[in-house]
Structures are given as C-alpha cells and as structure tokens.
Amino acid sequence: MEMSTSFPLPCLAMVHGVGAEHQQPTATTLFSLAGARPLTGVALEEELKNKSVCPTPQGWVLVQHRDAAAAAATYLLDPRSSQRIDLPHLAIQQGLIPYCSCLLAGDPTAPGCPVLVVEPMATLLWCCRVGDGEWTRHDYDIGTLGDEHFVEKRVIAPIAACRGRFYFNAVPAETRVLELARPGSGAPAFSSVATEPAEADRFGRARVFMVGTDDDELYKVVLLHHGGSYDEARVLKMDLSERRWRPVEDLGGRAFFVAPMYFGASCAPTGGRVRQDCIYSLVGVARNTFRVFSLKDGTSEVRQLEEEEEEQPAPETVGKSRPCWVLPTHPTS
C-alpha cells in the first residue's frame, strides 16, 4: 500500500505495546476525530513503529528509537510533514518516555529552542536546546507532601509552556514557574506567582491540566468527578495583571485537548475537524473512547472508536494500547 503524509489533524493515536508492563512499543494506529474511524495508509504509523513517543502540546512528537546507537536515535517529528529535528540521545528508560511531559519554549526549527522533559514520578527533569550535544539532567526539590506519618516529594504536574517560561502546579494561592538557564549558566530557576484565591478555583475530586496557547495565554482545565466518571469540565484563565484565575465560558474559538499524565494542549479548529470551544478528553474514559465537553452549553458526549478489522494476533504479542493526541505543529503547518 502506498503511504500518505496527508491526513487530518488533530487525530487520536493508539500506541500498542507488549512486554513487561506493556512498555515495549510495537505499533501505532491513528483515528480521525470527526468519524472516530481508523486512518489507513498513513506514513506516520510506519515512522512510529517500534519507537517510544511522547507528543508535545506544540504538536511536535518526541520520538526515541529502541537502539540508542541508531542514527537520529532521539528526535522531534512534525507528524504531518515528517520533518525531523535531531536531539541528543535521551538517557532515560525507554518505557518511561510515553509517560513524561515534553514541552517546547519556542519554535524548534530555530537553533537554541529550549526542550524540557519532565519525568512522571521522580523529581527529575531533562533540558537541552536544539543544536546541543547532550541533555542536562536536574534533580529538583519543590517541597514535600504529607504529615508526620508519611512524607513524599512534590513532583511537577501539571505543566504548560507560556511566554518562554513553564508554569506548573497551579493551586488557588500560587502558580509555580520554571525558567531554563541560559546556555552555560547553570541549573533551572524556580519561582512562583502569588494568586488571589477565587471561589471558582475551589473544587473537590478533580484532575487539573494546564494549557498554554499560541497567543501566550495561560489556562487551567479542571475535570470534575461525580460518582462514576470525570463528566464535568471547567476552564479558568490566568489574568497575570491581577494575578487571578478567572472562569471562562468559551475558548476563543479554540479546542483544548487533555490526556492522562497531565497532557494539555490548544488547537485552532480547521476544516470542521474539531468543534470550537470544546475540550477533547482521554481522561477517565472507557477503552477505545474519548469524551467531548462543550464549554458553551455545558454538555458532553462520549465517542466510541470504530475498531479495525484485523487478524487475531498471536497471544505473545497481545499488549496494552495507550491513547494520546496528535496535533498539528504550532504555528499550524
């Protein structure tokens, strides 16, 4: 079959894995959002075969080859054009890569663009700039959680890139800030922005995601849990002039995408593929489904992916599929 680089974005990717804890990637299946149907003959599926992937909110995908000695073992990939930007080999366990947060503080086609990778459970982050020869590993300390019986270190999650900085762990009274060091100037710098607590920023059981947009606005997406599922969404926007999170009733015509491991991204709807002022969520949903929240009317719907018709795989190759979003690069390519 002739492979095509022309396919609708955004789309949903199911990354299939086998082995211990299903962490060995084998293949990727892409699904359209409009019809929730498999996309066929897409070159991206072949490109990602047997590689670990971590989508960035800016659309580029961090890709790592199983073989660290392979040419371009670690790189950023534009999912539509297949353009690659080589990076130094990232020396972390390959099975962790899909669960990391990878963010860009600029346009990676420009030399010197900062690239940040945050490990999911450990207090470790990795930094490099496009054109560097190696990553810099940092063990950070942003405080602890717990009491006299049990104490654990706080980790960075959720996190978003905005205005050349990284904002994370937004709570009613403050939002933390991370700035990468200039080349050769040492460790990243941590600070915080004190915020005025607002009633709309108080909630019970919830998952919180942070989203940075192309026009340098910072948002917080809150998915509320009511008994059986995360079935209500709220969005707050940071007013940096007054240092307050304010509730919003629309997304300025955009769509937001959230996924497990605190992935949050913004996308300008094009070609009728996604709905304006909606949140597409892979959080707390059943297998092979995703939920779409309409911020304007407060409704939501669950969409079921159409299964591919394929031969039954051998038992030893059966593994777990992990969903993620694949977006157009920013600015839209």
Image: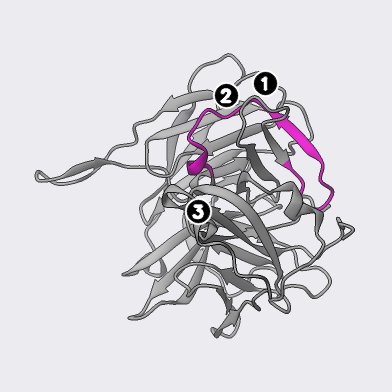
Residue with the mark numbered 3: 242
Q: Where does label 2 land, which residue? A: 135
Say whether residue 263 is visible: yes
Left or right: where 183 falls relative to 72: left
Q: Nearer the viewer, residue 116 or 39?
A: 39
Q: Residues within 10 Å of mark 1 (few under 14, many from 20)?
A: some
Quadrant in which residue 269 is drawn: bottom right
Q: Quick one: quadrant of the N terminus?
A: bottom right
Residue indicated by mark 1: 132
| Amino acid type, label 2 | Trp
Query: Of discs 3 and 2, which sits in the foreground?
Result: 2
In percent of the image, x 81 and y 68: which residue is there?
270
**Quarter of the image holding residue 223?**
bottom left
Position above or below: 258 against 225? above
Please report the residue visible at 48 percent of the width from the left and 39 percent of the height from the top: 177
Relative image position of residue 10 (x, y in whole percent) = 72, 63
Res 97 label? none
